[in-house]
Image (spheres, helix red, strand yellow):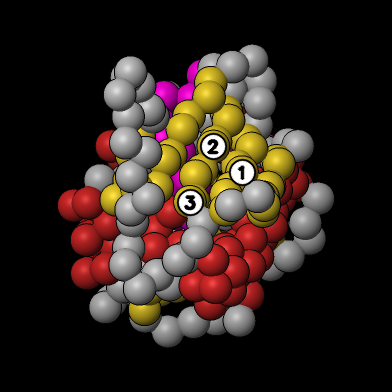
Amino acid sequence: MKKVLLSGCHGQMGHVLQRLIADKPTFEIVAGIDRTAKKNDDFPVYTTIDDVKEEVDVVIDFSHYSSVPTLINGCVAKEWPLVVATTGLTTETKAMLSVASHVIPVFYSANMSLGINVLIKALQAAAPALESDFNIEIIEKHHNQKKDAPSGTALLLADSINQTLTTPKEYLFGRAGNDLENDFNQMGIHAVRGGSIPGEHTVIFAGADEILEFKHTALSRDIFANGAMKAAEFLINQKAGLYSMQDLLA
């Protein structure tokens, strides 16, 4: 049985992971990290990784982006494999993940959904063929409690498309005004926030007289937890390095 340290254990995704891991005989949560501890926790909860005393095989992180740098340093010091599923990471934190990967196995994805990452493969196959004649727009929808916009997934999709284009497009976040050029070299990225939408992403390729749409809808948060668990299973057997969902799906 693999021993898991769950970072962000009291958050929404932390609770989802606790529920799913309870039904997975190959995993056991031995400790958690969160800003606050609760008396009814089923495992020890610490406010910092430095205080964790348990033996750990892998760390799964669904916390707040501001907490990730400390977690990275702690995992390097303890030589624990780290799965980072937290979104909104700064450029500096992403650089820390790259540095840490020289010492420990690190798995990072802006979206842990297997479906989203299969979608990326499809977009990268389609985009080069459509680049010369189609505008590309991305619309993302999330619940009204989501703090960051655009979503990390929308940026992940945009970056993945741009990687395949002869001339990468400039990102336009939203669109407003009375005299817009709607430059062909721009990729519009638009955010919708409302209700309890878990997550919906649509990529539109719009050409003359034809439109092609790729869409992914998350019906629950379980898909992200399941992806993180698959990432943890994969990472435990890897040597030091930086891994992503594309490595898992290869």
Which residue is most to the front?
209
Q: Residues within 10 Å of mark 3 (few under 14, many from 20)?
A: many
Question: In the image, residue 155 lies at what x, y percent?
Answer: 41, 48
Residue 98 image point, x, y percent: 27, 68
**Which numbered disc flags the more N-terminal residue, 2 or 1?**
2
How far across and down, in percent of the image, does residue 51 sit?
33, 45
> Mark 2 = which residue?
139
Q: Nearer the viewer, residue 117 or 223?
A: 117
Q: Is residue 156 above or below residue 8?
A: below
Dot 1, crowdedness within 10 Å: few (<14), some or many (≥20)? some
Inspect the image, locate mark 2, and give the three-letter code of the amino acid beneath it: Ile
Q: Which residues are magenta?
A: 145-157
Give the residue displayed 22% in from the left and 60% down from the top.
96
Image point 73% across, 65% down: which residue?
A: 26
Q: Nearer the viewer, residue 184 or 209?
A: 209
Pointers 2 and 1 in contact (CB under 8 A)? yes
- Measure how far apart labels 1 and 3 are at the Cα level: 14 Å
Q: Residue at x 59, y 17 (%)?
A: 194
Q: Is residue 43 visible?
A: yes
Q: Which residue is mark 3?
A: 135
Q: Quadrant of residue 64?
A: top left
Which picture quadrant has residue 181?
Answer: top left
The kind of residue on which mark 3 rests is: Asn
| Disc 3 element | strand
Identify the residue under disc 1: 202
- Position of residue 84 measured from the top left corner of the image (x, y, whole percent): 44, 54
User: Under tag 1, what secondary structure?
Assistant: strand
Q: Are marks 1 and 3 in contact (CB under 8 Å)?
A: no
Q: Quadrant of the N terminus?
A: bottom right
Report if the CB atoms under discs 2 and 3 are less than 8 Å apart. Answer: no
